[in-house]
Amino acid sequence: MAFERFWHKSYVPGVPNEIEIEKITMPDILTRSSRKFSNHTAFIYMGKKITFYDLEKMVNRFTRALIDLGVKKGDNVGMLLPNIPQIIIADHAAYRIGAVTAMNNPLYTERELEYQLNDADVSVLVTLDLLLPRALKIKGNTRIEKIITCHISDFLPFPKKQLFPFVKKDMYRKIEPQENVYQFMDLLKNYADDSLENQAGWDDLAALIYTGGTTGVSKGAMLTHANISSVIQQFTAWFPTLNEGEESLLGIYPIFHSAGYSVSQNMTLLKGWTCILIPRPEPAAIIEMLKKYKPSFLPGVPTIYMGLLGNEEFRTMDLSFIKGYFGGAAPLPEDTIRQLNELHGAIINDVYGATENTAFATCTPWGGKVKARTVGVPLPNTDIKIVDLEDGEKELPVGQAGEICIKGPQVMQGYYKKPEETAQSLKNGWFYLGDIGIFDEDGYLSIVDRKKDMIIGSGFNIYPNEIDDILFSHPKILEACVIGVADEYRGETVKAYVVVKPGESLTPEEVIQYCRDHLAAYKVPRMVEFIDVLPKSAIGKILRRELKELDKKKSEA
């Protein structure tokens, strides 16, 4: 069995390498938690507290509303929402019917949305009233029959709710009555809240979560109830010292993304924890929630942590209540880890995975050994192997870099309506991530780079992440990203895009010299371009592919 050589080790005291997965779907998890943690707070949204009991009642109401609108088992219900209570209620109502939630990024353009909603065969869309004009504009080119709108102030407590339309006029839209457009809160009021029978089966499709298109056209990962339930059981088993009904975390990861779908929405429901929803994860909003609610965990991606570390209030506030940080989307730069450790001393849990394996495959051991520049070790019930980049079959030994492959109950069933892409990525139960990784002698995994991002210059394999890390460590650099550009002599050469910290100044020569001091000559960028902001995904991951496209357009122009 892959990874068998490391299985004799106890990474987390008290946690076996394999746990027994309970075959319980999310609707039944919510029902059980609504009884077990009845008056505990499940979610907090801008001061509004929603208990587990109230959440279950609202899900029951909205389930009946969706059934009345014609949604049935197997239908695909589109979600176009940020982190607000309505997305959780709507997702879990769709689960209960046995319908499929198709997640969409609210920041997408009309072109991107039209493609994705069509690809997902969405018939009913739940969205913000702010986005209704966009949805109506593309509706005729999609299969959408009915739209349900909600407003970000729907769950605000008094007096915030009354003041909100005046404070945020540009974000408020009055919805005129029109055919096949329904108000979310009206639907909640019009239906009974008593329990309904759960129609979802363990192996039924539960969600389509899209890959985000960072490697081309976005693809819908087909996640079953088994995938979704298994991954939160695997992940919570990793933290045996944490108590049911007593922990809390900031809901920074967007729920339309796989990490937020698993952590911000579903994981907390299993253990009776509280999630503090943050619709827009800016430093000021995060700091306000930290001061007010003192959560146990602060999840984020490198760009979020760097933004916080650049804020004086964050650097000086008492954060002794934080038990751990979760890093994801990209490896945390060593300098960021060091600063967080020096400031607050909490454990930094680097998490690794992909949409296709419901977000989680590895994590830094909780209460175990922490190793810098790694993403930890495989979670329970998860096998990982490193295979040769050329043939994709030969398993490589410790210390040798190759493509990362994952097998486990959290791995998707395939890409929606894309059998060829599925066959390329799923082979004999193994999901090929397209990332290059390496195991060390203790079984800790390090991510070298994306297979498609690897630069080949003068015959050498150059991994952009390594150079990015060096640039991030420069005291005057806020963010950086390197790409490979065509070079007649070397094949490809390294170009660095750099964002300078406010108030600082740098020259290309200084950047290149800094790299010369820390890197082998063939890895040093030959070109440096300064840029105001780097393109990022919804969760703050720097999008190297978009930077390549931007550079290509500049070259052609």
Image (tube, grey):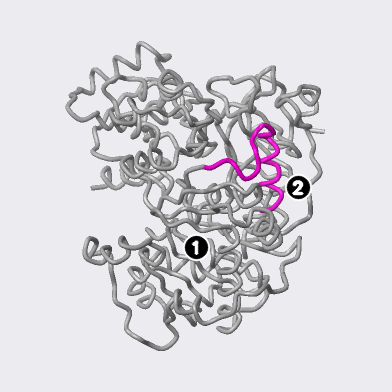
Query: Left or right of 471: which side holds 7?
Result: right
- The answer to whether any part of residue 408 appears in the image is yes
Q: Position of residue 533 (x, y in %)?
A: 27, 40
Q: Position of residue 314 (x, y in %)?
A: 34, 31
In the rendered image, which quarter is residue 194 located in?
Answer: bottom right
Of marks 2 and 1, the one in the foreground: 1
Query: Please, what secondary structure does the residue beneath circle 1 have?
Result: helix
Residue 87's disc is 1
N-terminal of the pair, mark 2 or mark 1, is: 1
Tell whether position 239 is magenta: yes
Residue 429's disc is 2
Q: Position of residue 295 (x, y in %)?
A: 48, 39
Query: Left or right of 390: which side holds 533?
Result: left
Query: Please, what secondary structure does the residue beneath circle 2 have?
Result: loop
Looking at the rendering, the stretch of residues picked out in magenta corresponds to 228-248
Q: Position of residue 109 (x, y in %)?
A: 36, 62
Tell whether position 327 is magenta: no
In the rendered image, which quarter is residue 472 located in?
Answer: top left
